[in-house]
Image (cartoon, rainbow, N blue to C red):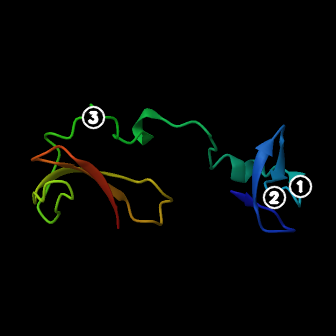
């Protein structure tokens, strides 16, 4: 990752040069090929990044949490899955599905 020397914002690669993402700055610099070979930038989302929030997503067979209470029916068990939805230095998000009524919710740690 390369940062702008003038304003400190992250720079992105465009047309073989690095461009500051701060619209007020707009500085460009030569691309550091040695550093660029170590990282991959992408805007695309892979199938592994998709969070199971659709109605038909399978939670059955996932681990069971017993330290939760469903807001809909008050049941104390739910299946859960964990996804990293923020940056790597943030805790993951747990997605739950109540074993009793099927209500779904998420918990940010």
Question: Residue 54 appears in which quarter of the rendering?
Answer: top left
Label 3 close to label 2 by CB (< 8 Å) = no
Residue 61 placement, left or right of 24: left
What mark, if any, has residue 22 been given in the picture? 2
Alpha carbon distance from label 1 to label 2: 6 Å
The residue pinned by badge 3 equals 57
Q: Nearer the viewer, residue 62 or 40?
A: 62
Q: Mark 3 vs mark 2: which is more N-terminal?
A: 2
Residue at the far front: name it.
72
Residue name at image x 81 percent, y 63 percent? 4
Q: Callout 1: helix, strand or loop?
A: loop
Residue 53 placement, left or right of 30: left
- The percent position of residue 49, horizontal first and vertical second, equals 44, 41
The 10 Å Cα crowd at callout 3, few under 14, some 14 to 19, many 20 or more, is few
- Counting the numbered discs, the total is 3
Numbered disc in front, either 3 or 2: 3
Above or below, comparing residue 101 to residue 71 in the picture: above
Residue name at image x 39 percent, y 65 percent? 91
Label 1 close to label 2 by CB (< 8 Å) = yes
Q: Callout 2: helix, strand or loop?
A: loop
Above or below, comparing residue 2 to residue 53 in the picture: below
The residue pinned by badge 1 equals 26
Residue 70 placement, left or right of 26: left
- The percent position of residue 60, horizontal first and vertical second, equals 15, 39
Residue name at image x 35 percent, y 67 percent? 109
Label 1 close to label 3 by CB (< 8 Å) = no
Numbered disc in front, either 1 or 3: 3
């Amino acid at each position: 990752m390369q940062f702008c020397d003038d304003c400190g914002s992250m720079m992105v690669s465009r047309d073989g040069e690095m461009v500051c993402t701060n619209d007020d700055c707009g500085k460009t610099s030569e691309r550091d090929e040695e550093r660029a070979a170590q990282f991959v930038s992408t805007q695309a989302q892979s199938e592994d990044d998709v969070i199971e929030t659709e109605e038909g997503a399978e939670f059955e067979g996932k681990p069971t949490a017993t330290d939760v209470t469903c807001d809909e029916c008050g049941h104390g068990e739910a299946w859960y899955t964990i996804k990293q939805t923020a940056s790597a230095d943030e805790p993951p998000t747990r997605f739950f599905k109540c074993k009793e009524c099927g209500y779904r919710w998420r918990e940010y740690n």
